[in-house]
């Protein structure tokens, strides 16, 4: 797995340097329509989903989790951490801050859980309420949307690649695998030019979005 992560990290660096152009022709009209229908039925607050799969944190934010029919039974949150809608970016955090701020009832996905999500879902580049991102359809037909919220690289206060690339922390520290001088962790990475999301890497000091899981 070490070699896979190292190769993915170098791919991540290359992608970051190259950038990408959004192509609206890649949007899947059926997926867009299904999200819009789901959005109208749920009034933007996931209220039609089973409350048994919901968590309310100390700030009163309700997080609802969707069963995608994955082999492990992992439930994925329908929204990013601190987001009010499924298409909202939510909070941007460093890897260490993300680990400390996630409500105790849920967690960052493990490497295995992120890999399972990528492998078992069918992916399409699409929009929800004019926000670009990837939709994933699980084996049971349920959907998840991952918005392309971009990244604050290292200690920068400038958001880059919003609407074109999405980044989500994975609970796996790769510092010793890359270099003792490079503090890094794995991420779930996606961009509009890709067919499916990828497992890649980013430095701890970068600030990106968080999508939690519950099992």
Image (tube, rainbow, N blue to C red):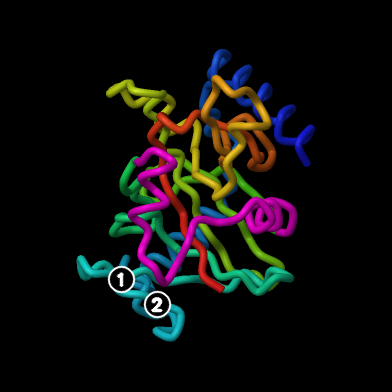
Q: Quadrant of residue 72?
A: bottom right
In x, y percent, where is residue 155? 34, 23
From this view, report whether residue 131 is shown above or below residue 102: above
Q: Give the crowd class for mark 1: few <14, some 14-19, many >=20 residues within 10 Å.
A: some
Q: Main secondary structure of the magenta part?
A: helix
Which label number is shown at residue 182?
none
- Residue positioned 46% across, 33% down in the render: 204
- Are circles 2 and 1 on residues that touch, CB within 8 Å? yes
Q: Give the residue pinned by disc 1.
A: 62
Quick check: 135 above or below 160?
A: below
Magenta stretch encompasses residue 105: yes
Question: In which quadrant is the C terminus drawn?
Answer: bottom right
* Residue 38 in which image quadrant: bottom left
Distance between the alpha carbons at the discs numbered 2 and 1: 7 Å
Inspect the magenta stretch and tell me whether residue 126 lies in it.
Answer: no
Q: Position of residue 100 (x, y in %)?
A: 36, 53
Q: Position of residue 134 (x, y in %)?
A: 55, 46
Query: Residue at 69% across / 51% down in the picture?
Result: 115
Dot 1: element: strand
Question: In which quadrant will I find the N terminus?
Answer: top right
Indicate whether 20 appears above or below 128: above
Earlier along the polypeptide chain: callout 2 or callout 1?
A: 2
Q: Residues within 10 Å of mark 2 (few under 14, many from 20)?
A: some
Q: Nearer the viewer, residue 113 or 120?
A: 113
Q: Quadrant of residue 106?
A: bottom left
Q: Is residue 12 above or below residue 196?
A: above
For the residue pair 43 and 157, the one nearer the viewer reads as 157
Residue bearing the label numbered 2: 54
Question: In the rendered structure, which segment of residues is drawn in magenta?
Answer: 93-120
Q: How many marks?
A: 2
Q: Secondary structure at mark 2?
A: strand
Query: In the rendering, at what x and y percent does residue 61 appear?
Result: 26, 67
């Amino acid at each position: 797995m070490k070699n896979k992560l190292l190769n993915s990290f170098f791919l991540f660096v290359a992608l970051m340097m190259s950038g990408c152009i959004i192509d609206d022709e890649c949007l899947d009209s059926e997926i867009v329509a299904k999200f819009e229908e789901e959005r109208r039925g749920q009034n933007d607050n996931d209220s039609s989903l089973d409350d048994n799969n919901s968590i309310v944190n100390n700030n009163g934010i309700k997080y609802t989790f969707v069963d995608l029919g994955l082999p492990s039974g992992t439930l994925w949150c329908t929204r990013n951490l601190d987001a009010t809608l499924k298409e909202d970016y939510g909070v941007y955090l460093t890897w260490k801050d993300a680990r400390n701020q996630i409500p105790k009832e849920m967690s960052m996905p493990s490497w295995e859980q992120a890999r399972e999500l990528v492998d078992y879902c069918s992916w399409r580049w699409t929009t929800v309420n004019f926000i670009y991102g990837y939709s994933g359809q699980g084996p049971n037909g349920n959907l998840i949307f991952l918005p392309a919220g971009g990244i604050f690289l290292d200690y920068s206060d400038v958001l880059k690649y919003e609407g074109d690339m999405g980044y989500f922390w994975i609970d796996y520290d790769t510092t010793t695998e890359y270099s003792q001088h490079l503090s890094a962790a794995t991420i779930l990475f996606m961009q509009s030019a890709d067919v499916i999301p990828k497992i890649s890497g980013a430095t701890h000091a970068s600030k990106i979005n968080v999508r939690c899981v519950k099992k």
